[in-house]
Amino acid sequence: MTLALPLWFEIGSMVLLTAILIVDLLLIIKRPHVPSMREASLWVGFYVLLALVFAGAIYLLGDAQHATEFVAGWLTEYSLSIDNLFVFVLILGAFKVPSAYQQRALMIGIVLALVFRGIFILVGAAIIERFIAVFFIFGAWLIWTAWQQVKPGGHEDQGDSWIIRQVKKVLPFSDEYDGGKLRTTVDGKRMFTPFLLVLIALGATDLLFALDSIPAIFGITQSPFIVFTANVFALMGLRQLYFLLGGLLEKLPYLKYGIAAILAFIGVKLILHALHENELPFINGGEPVAVPDITTGMSLIFILAAMVVSTVASVWKAKQVAKATGETLHFGAAEPHAHDSAADQGPAKDRDSDAGN
């Protein structure tokens, strides 16, 4: 069933979302800083409320079916984005990015994620329209990805990945940061700062996560408009969520199991849908296969349950560990490391003061 929303609503939504992202980016460029817990909480709450208001608008201007699809898709993408955020934490930690410039790196990473996902959405929609059997491939990929989530070593340190090593062989890099610049001068020689490596690592990670997130949401809805807006809303506020959670992500041991369960569930749903719409001659003679139909409502309930159970179990486990070790478990903005104050000032070696780079 095709979603019929007023053209003014679709265009207006895109314009508004783009404007919010641009304003967010300009704020970071103008005033790089580590947001307080209150600031981060307000921004995350604002973006969540905005997503719920958007779902209500789809319900009023469209129908309940597509409003439910948006909420389910948004929650799925949000859970996958949190997983994406976990890897961002590893990357920023591996490269020792100064706290004041972590926001800039995160925002650029989020913009790159939107670009990659936008491309994948256009390509995925075109393929699905012509070849519904691609859902067999999507489903198998998500199930395999779910297994990768839960097996040991599912989250690799991106600080010394293959692509980073190749870039280092080709381009000259300084050992220290120069504020938020991409290039600097050390001993009279122009070279790139580690900040460029951070952006490359974030971009490569975004590309890999787009391979998971797009098939996952196409398993919930086939409306390109809902797919894209759900991704935008999932990524909005992710930067503030990073500072809100601080180092707590690594203390949520069961979160990856909840995400894996969601991916596996949607993978199975995609395969069942492909069987229901089967056109492959070597399966049931090219005729549809009578298989159970997983509704959007069932998907929404499962997604919510997986997120709640994995989060509650993780928090309980973290509290038990903290109690046993005598530590204090709390949510809060990430604390700057000792090296940050010095790194924020840039390298001590000779460099130019040109702020244009």
Image (spheres, rainbow, N blue to C red):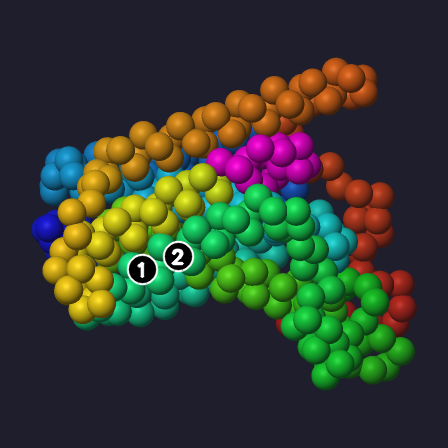
Residue contact at pointers 1 and 2, CB within 8 angstroms = yes
Three-letter amino acid code at the position of disc 1: Phe
Q: What stretch is highlighted in magenta?
A: 239-258
Instruction: Name the one closer to the observer, 288 or 243.
Output: 288
Confirm whether residue 151 shows in the render.
Answer: yes
Whether the magenta-drawn stretch holds residue 355 is answered as: no
Asked whether, in this view, residue 7 is left or right of residue 150, the answer is left
Task: Tell me where residue 135 appears, x and y as whole percent.
Answer: 29, 59
Q: Does 293 sit above or below residue 251?
A: below
Main SS of residues in magenta: helix
Label 1 CA crowd tier, 10 Å (few <14, some 14–19, many 20+): some
Q: Does 131 sit above or below residue 67?
A: below
Q: Which image quadrant is residue 295 in?
A: top left
Instruction: Name the one closer to the observer, 341 or 74.
Output: 74
Residue shown at 66%/47% (left/top)? Answer: 152
Task: Tell me the element at label 1.
Answer: helix
Whether the magenta-drawn stretch holds residue 257 is answered as: yes
Residue shown at 56%/60% (left/top)? Answer: 205
**Which residue has dot 1 on it?**
136
Q: Which image quadrant is residue 343 in?
A: bottom right
Instruction: Name the one closer to the observer, 275 or 295.
Output: 275
**Which residue has dot 2 on it?**
140
| Label 1, label 2: how far apart the Cα atoms are | 6 Å
Three-letter amino acid code at the position of disc 2: Ala
Task: Tell me the element at label 2.
Answer: helix
Confirm whether residue 6 shows in the render.
Answer: no
Task: Tell me where residue 252 appears, x and y as whole percent.
Answer: 61, 32
